[in-house]
Amino acid sequence: MEDNVFPVRRVRLLVNPIAGYGLSKIIIPYIIYHLERQNIKYKIFVPESDTSINKYLCDLSDDEFVGFVGGDGTFHSILNNISDFSHPICAFPTGTGNAYAKELNLPRTTKKIVNLIMKGHYVEWLLGYDSISRIKFGLFCGAGFHSQVIKHFQINRKGPTLITSYIKWGLHCVKRETLPRICVTIDGNQVVNDTCWVEIFNVSHYGGPLRLLPFANPKDDYYNVIIFKGKTKRDVLRLLLTGFIRYLGNHNYCIKDIESYQGKNISISSPSKVPFHMDGDYKGYLPVEISPLVKRLKFIC
């Protein structure tokens, strides 16, 4: 899908003040400086809740677009609170993972990002939608063991995202949680009925530098699904260790015990109470019914 161009005149900028250990607040003066140098009008908003984000984005003018300063969680909040996808979005990545930024190879300096904004080129980004919870995602969605970890982490979170916290709650879940049994159906065909971990990918990056599915692309028309075949907690520990080694060294060690699929309409269910996440945020319990949104997100890059 070819890039398009949006004439940039004004931007509404949302700032997540805790993203990147407070980096968002530090770079705001630099963003303002470069926007003013390019004569781009702006409004800056620090949201208190998703409700306030929704109100802030409900009356965009025709020549206005949405910008945000934050990570993958901020990106997820934007997706679920913007009502008109005809307005492009841009991003100043300051989060811990920044999977969306790695996918688009966005620069990390404010000057270069403002230059991208001035050019106005954007790509159309596939979005996923759960018809049951009515929640959208742009990066990944999953259920099972990893979602158990995310749930504990999110409930106990008291500040910026720390990788060490994921490790802590990962070991906690290995010790205390029971591995769930999950059924996955892709485009009407049941592919498994007893996995303990499934992830739907719209991007190739996951958890920062981890690149689990190099061929996943948000500009195509389908999702990539990986299903963990391990049955024991020892298998899960091995998977966590491999992922951690890849994270530390940005290596591409082979991850065993996974199968990959592609599809558009994905159902995930379980006979037990199993949490699911979207874009790394805990969202509730299965089942979910995932399908692509007709309208795509316009992402300046």
Image (tube, rainbow, N blue to C red):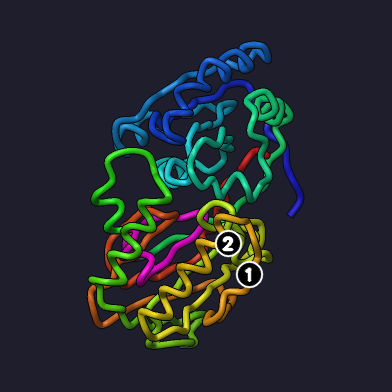
Residue at 63 percent of width and 48 percent of height: 102
Of 34 and 170, nearer the camera is: 170
Q: Which sits earlier in the primary sequence, circle 1 or circle 2?
A: 2
Residue at 56 percent of width and 30 percent of height: 65
Of 178 and 295, nearer the camera is: 178
Amino acid type at circle 1 is Tyr
Residue at 73 percent of width and 42 percent of height: 4
In the image, residue 226 lies at what x, y percent? 52, 74
Q: Which residue is mark 1?
A: 253
Q: Quadrant of residue 212?
A: bottom right
Tell me if I can see residue 59 in this picture: no
In the image, residue 89 lies at what x, y percent? 56, 37
- In the structure shown, which secondary structural element does the residue marked by tag 2 occupy? helix
Q: Are marks 1 and 2 in contact (CB under 8 Å)?
A: yes
117 relative position to 240: left or right: right
Amino acid type at circle 2 is Arg
Crowd class of label 1 (few under 14; some 14 to 19; many from 20; radius 10 Å): few
Of 109 and 237, nearer the camera is: 237
The verdict on residue 140 being magenta is yes
Q: CA distance from mark 1 to mark 2?
A: 7 Å
- In the structure shown, which secondary structural element does the residue marked by tag 1 occupy? loop
Q: Which residue is mark 2?
A: 246
The verdict on residue 260 being magenta is no
Q: Quadrant of residue 179?
A: bottom left
Residue at 63 percent of width and 69 percent of height: 253
Magenta extent: 132-150
Tell me if I can see residue 230 in this picture: yes
* Above or below: residue 177 compared with residue 297: below
- The C terminus, quarter of image: top right
